[in-house]
Structures are given as structure tokens and as C-alpha cells.
Amino acid sequence: MITKSDGITESQFSQLREYIEQQCGIALGDEKAYLIDTRLTKLMVESGCEDFGEFYKLAKSETGTTLRDKIVDAMTTNETLWFRDAHPYKILLEKLIPTFAEELAAGKRSVVRIWSGACSTGQEPYSVAIAVHEHCRTHAGVKPEQFKILGTDISASALFLAKAGRYDRIAMKRGLDDDVRDRYFKQNGQIWVIDETIKKMVEFKKFNLQDPLVCLGRFDIAFLRYVAIYFSDAFKKSLLAAVADVLSPSGYLLVGAVESLRGHSDAFENHTHSGGSYYKRCA
Ligand SMILES: C[S@@+](CC[C@H](N)C(=O)[O-])C[C@H]1O[C@@H](n2cnc3c(N)ncnc32)[C@H](O)[C@@H]1O
């Protein structure tokens, strides 16, 4: 049963949650009426609407994408931090990068493509870039330019911050060791700016995970962390099938620490390393 929220009726909530799921896959449970109320009221007022019913009609009748993009942006949760959960980066540094680095050194491949499929404000792909850079700094025969990192997200405002590579004091306190911070960031007043070498290693693109992933090319490693938790089971399944299709035969997938593929995909084998879990595409 839908849990009521003061500013939105049950039918307005039903209409808007269906609209939101269609646009970005975010599936709001019955108890989430308050989320639309808190996140979209300002936009509803700014759009000149008197209530969420009028706002829904306006969004549905839009021929362009301006209002849709603002709605999606407001409904996304961009929570992220540096080296989130630590173990994916241990797996990356101790297992995946050395495996691919060996292939690079042996001339079996010329490049390794890594995708951060819901990169938010950039902490995830930049953490990957720092891990790659650290490996190259301490191992001869492999160069950072051989790793191509792509960060994609649906949220334009999150991507804007990611591309700028500028972070405030609070963001910098979340997950960064002082020595990594001092090596890869410069302080400019209250802002920390990521080093150009790391910035250059990451390309950012706006991309909706509902769109065909083949448009992004093939990847050797995919980070799809803390995003599928917002999607319906049906969308999760089709997304994981699409991820398996764009991963190279020896490709790897990393999901959030609280996420599991069980019941959603049998295209991956589960592996563990140092207490953390990662997935390898079934051959
Ligand atoms: C909680 S953040 C996770 C960020 C990062 N992966 C991490 O683990 O720290 C979820 C991100 O998913 C993005 N997102 C939600 N729906 C999406 C969609 N359909 N396509 C692409 N990105 C989406 C949001 O904009 C948000 O930045």
C-alpha cells in the first residue's frame, strides 16, 4: 500500500513513479512518495505548476528533454566516496591489473578498457585511475596510457563535478588517505583539484543504462556499483545480460559490497579475494 506524503496524492505518486521508471529505471517502492515530494517540489513550483498532477502532465507533454533531465537529475542519489569499500581496489591492484598488465607486456593486447557505469561525481573512476597509476609507478613495462577509463552517468550535475575534478573538504575526507591525497591532488583555497595526469586517464560521458550498452564499446573490467539497487528485478536482469555482452571473454564485473548477482544473472562466475567478491564473465 502506498504510504502517503502530505504534498502528493496517491494517483499523482503513481503517475510520477511510472514516469520516473520509464525515464531512468529507478523504481520507487510504495513507501517512497515522500522522495518525490522532497526532491521534486522545488522543480514543480519553478515550472509554474500548481500541483504534481499538473507537473506530471507538463513532463509527459514535453517535446524536448529539459524538464525530463531535471527530474531525473533530482531523483538520482549520487552518494559516493573514494575507494568505496576498499576491497574492489585491492582486487583491482592485486588481481586484475597484474593479469592485464602481463598481457600488455607480452604484447597480447594493446589496451585495457575499464568502465565505471554509474560514476556519479567521479570518485569511482578516479579511484580506479589512481590504482592504475600506482601500479604503473611501481612496475616497469606498463604505462597508464594503456588503460582507458570511461565514467558514465545519467546525472548531468554529477557529471559536471566529475569532469571538473574539483572536490570540497567533506568529499576529500571520505575514503582518501593523506598520502594519496597529497600525491594526486592540489589544494586551491577550500577546493582540492585532481592531478592532470589522473584527470587525463578518465573520459566522462552522459549515458542512461537503459540505452544499448554496445554504443559504449567493449570493456575488460566493469564497475557497476550501487546503481542496480535502485532498479526493478526485470531491469537488473536485462542490464546484467547486456553487461555480460559488452565484457570481453576474460572480462570482470565489480558490484557493490551489499549487492549480489544471485537470481539475476548466470553469465558470471563469483570469485573472492581478500574477503571481497568479484565476478568473471563465463567463457
Ligand atoms: C549511489 S551512486 C553510485 C556511485 C558509484 N558507483 C559508487 O558506488 O560510489 C548511483 C549513481 O547511479 C546513477 N544512475 C541512476 N540511474 C541511472 C541510469 N539509468 N543510468 C545511468 N546512471 C544512473 C545516479 O545518477 C548516481 O550517480
Image (cartoon, rainbow, N blue to C red):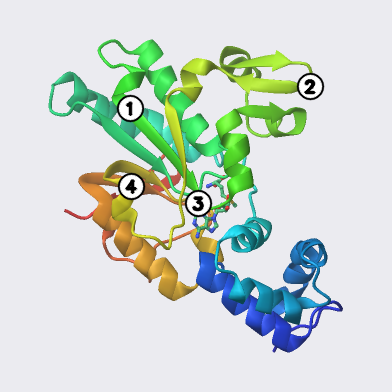
In space, the residues marked 4 and 1 are separated at their CA atoms by 16 Å
Residue at disc 4, secondary structure = helix
Q: Position of residue 217 (x, y in %)?
A: 28, 45
Residue at disc 3, secondary structure = loop
In space, the residues marked 1 and 2 are separated at their CA atoms by 31 Å
In space, the residues marked 3 and 2 are separated at their CA atoms by 31 Å
The residue shown at (80%, 65%) is 38
Residue at disc 2, secondary structure = loop
Q: Residues within 10 Å of mark 1 (few under 14, many from 20)?
A: many
User: Which residue carries the number 4 mark?
Assistant: 216
- Horizontally, residue 16 falls left or right of residue 278, namely right
- Mark 3 is on which residue type? Gly
- Mark 2 is on which residue type? Gln
* Residue, far right: 6
Residue at disc 1, secondary structure = strand
- Determine whether label 4 and label 3 are within 8 Å by CB: no
Q: Residues within 10 Å of mark 2 (few under 14, many from 20)?
A: few
For residue 31, what is the image quadrant?
Answer: bottom right
Mark nearest the camera among 4 and 1 is 4
User: Which residue carries the number 3 mark?
Assistant: 256
Identify whether 269 is placed above or below 237: above
Say which mark, if any, is on residue 190: 2
- Horizontally, residue 248 falls left or right of residue 51, namely left
